[in-house]
Image (spheres, rainbow, N blue to C red):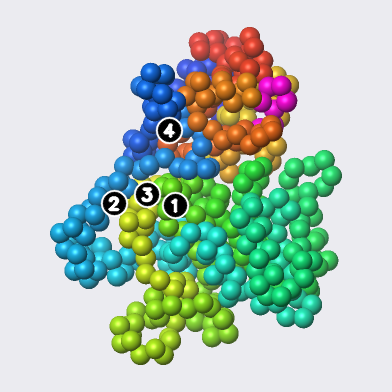
Amino acid sequence: MEHLRAVALESGLALDDLRFAQEMDRRDPLAHLRSEFAIPTVRQVAGDESAGDDSACVYMCGNSLGLMPRRARAILDEEMDEWASRGVVGHFRHSKNRPWVGYRWPIAEKMAPLVGAMPLEVGVMNTLTTNLHLLLAAFYRPAGKRCKILIESKAFPSDHYAIESQIRWHGQPASAMLLAEPRAGEHTLRTQDILDLIEREGDSIAVVMLSGVQFYTGQAFEMGKITAAARAAGCVVGWDLAHAAGNVPLSLHDWGVDFACWCTYKYLNAGPGSISCFFVHERHARSPELCRLAGWWSHEEETRFDMSNRFAPAAGAAGFEPSNTPIFVAATLLGSLDVFAQTSMPALRGKSLLLTAYLEHLLLTLCGGGLRIITPHDHRGAQLSLLFDAEKFQPAVDALAAAGIVCDERKPDCIRLAPVPLYNTFADVWRCVDVICSVTAPGRHAQSGSDVGV
């Protein structure tokens, strides 16, 4: 907010003036990255060719599915052409110097800085929940009293089901699922409450498995603190980073995380059903005690084609990949990572903080009492979750859709807004709030050319 107010003062424009948002966009050092993405039009997202117009929509749903990087289509087309023109030869002699047999490596190298890892520690395979099961097969080894898995009480359903089924699979009682609950009347978990729970239950917890950013509330957990406390208590630490990877800065290696996994279709913009990635810390690079579920592709590269049937795991995360990389869903991720390579996570985080601060300011100052923000002010990523008064929720959903603003609704009363720094603008934020204000506080719209004080 200090930065936003300084720009407002320098420009002589009010914070709630559209011209201020446009001035912020002119000053944005990452503005050029927006052209790397295909932005749907209002007509296209309306689903009715007779409705809307051909101007760009306001896309605030990158927390669910990121927009398509143009490079993703380009690389996918190249791989299709490679298959058509070379067939099996593309596995080893590729016209673009991307042999399919080693397709995982450029992805691991480009993904590593986004999650604070070494390339050796990054794996590429499957989808998120499948990876969660494969990693738990190696890391969840209940023994005696230490049999519990700690998760959030409101974890994403897929995580809940995976953990629940792993506990059953290992013959453990239902009580082995330890739930971290928010305090009565609160929506988010306090870090100290998590740390206190780990201290109380530490000798009974086998795995701490939380989300880096909570899907519903948008709360970003203090992963470094929680990891340190859990490891000190003798627990294995895993993270679901579906809403964190490509969104908030991560330091998986330095934090000492044992394992993590994430999808790539949200903030990483690799497309629906795209390949998932995972992390296994370097200290487990060749751990013989880890009873991993192995396959041909997790065998070391140097002797893989000897077909000896004597398993020698590849070093690092590669040793946890049972099967070869599916090229076409990995190609779109590679295209997206090429866009990320033009910037850095600190730069993206800097813009993200400005976008969410601007969104929060406009919502709180203009939209009246018809909504409240449940995302923590000091621990969040690119998403703000809004709870609406019952009578205003559906009108707000309808008004946003009619205006060509794409966001996520969670009945009965929540709308999630995610301004993504790679392609969203300050003008996008202004337009989104202007529509919400028309429902929650008619007559108090944001200004399109005012001289109201800042």
Secondary element under disc 2, as helix, strand or loop, is: helix
Residue at which label 2 appears: 76
Q: Could you tell me how far apart the alpha carbons at marks 1 and 3 are, in whole angstroms?
A: 14 Å
Secondary element under disc 3, as helix, strand or loop, is: helix
Q: Residues within 10 Å of mark 4 (few under 14, many from 20)?
A: some
Q: Could you tell me how far apart the alpha carbons at marks 4 and 2 are, in whole angstroms?
A: 30 Å
Three-letter code, disc 4: Asp
Q: Residue 191: horizontal and vertical position, in percent?
A: 74, 53
Marks 1 and 3: which is nearer the front? Answer: 1
Dividing the picture into quadrants, the one containing residue 69 is top left
The first of marks 1 and 3 along the sequence is: 1
Q: Residues within 10 Å of mark 3 (few under 14, many from 20)?
A: many
Residue at which label 1 appears: 273
Residue at which label 3 appears: 336
Residue 373 in view of the camera:
no
Q: Is residue 255 above or below residue 403?
A: below
Marks 1 and 2: which is nearer the front? Answer: 1
